[in-house]
Each structure stands twice: as structure tokens, then as C-alpha cells.
Image: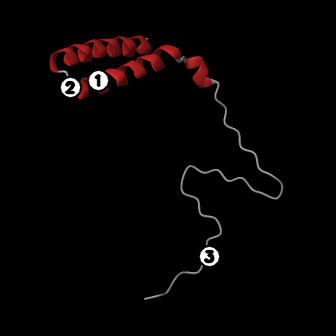
Amino acid sequence: MIKIFLITLNIGALIASIFWYYKSKEIEPIVSILTLISTLIVLLFTNKKNLTKIKLNQKGGKNSKNYQSAKKIVINQSDKKDNAT
């Protein structure tokens, strides 16, 4: 449902950009037209099934460790503090 709305909105903006180019003959409408055409192509040729099939895998070799974190991770940091003043 939302994809149909986005495609409709994109086509409307594309028509407006073509009209804008017809009236002004400048570079900005050309950039807008090219961007909207590429967005329309992506919207038409992608589907939700392809996006949900993506799987993430992580493999480590011998004598290695795999670390995964949602935040900053620091490895091999000394516990000593710098007292330089």
C-alpha cells in the first residue's frame, strides 16, 4: 500500500519537474528529473521478498575471535591511566 503511494507521489513529482524544465530550461530540473527517474526504477524493480532474504553471516578462522557489539568496542586497551600533566 505504501509502495503504491510512493510510486504515485514520485510520478507526480516527475511530471512537475518536467513542467518545471519546460518553463525554465535550467540545470536544477534536469537533476530533479534524473533523480526521480532513478527512484522510480528502484521502486518498480524491488520488492519486499528480496529485502527479507538478506542473511548476515560472520565466520572466523582458526585462532581468531569474532566480536559483535551494538556500541563502541575497545580491544587490547591497557588498564593503566596516563598521568601526564
Amino acid type indicated by mark 1: Ile
> Which residue is identified by label 1?
30
Q: Residue at x 80, y 52 (%)?
A: 61
Residue extending furthest left?
A: 23
Give percent across and percent down for residue 78: 62, 76
**Left or right of residue 25: residue 8:** right
**Left or right of residue 65: residue 47:** left
Q: CA distance from mark 2 to mark 1?
A: 7 Å
Amino acid type indicated by mark 2: Glu
Q: Earlier in the sequence, mark 3 or mark 2?
A: 2
> Which residue is identified by label 3?
78
Q: Contact (CB < 8 A) between labels 2 and 1? A: yes
> Which residue is identified by label 2?
26
Q: Residue at x 51, y 83 (%)?
A: 82
Give percent across and percent down for residue 12: 29, 12
Where residue 3 sits, quadrant-wise, is top left
- The answer to which of 44 and 54 lies nearer the viewer is 44
Q: Residue at x 45, y 17 (%)?
A: 41
Q: CA distance from mark 1 to mark 3?
A: 56 Å
Amino acid type indicated by mark 3: Ser
Give percent across and percent down for residue 59: 75, 45
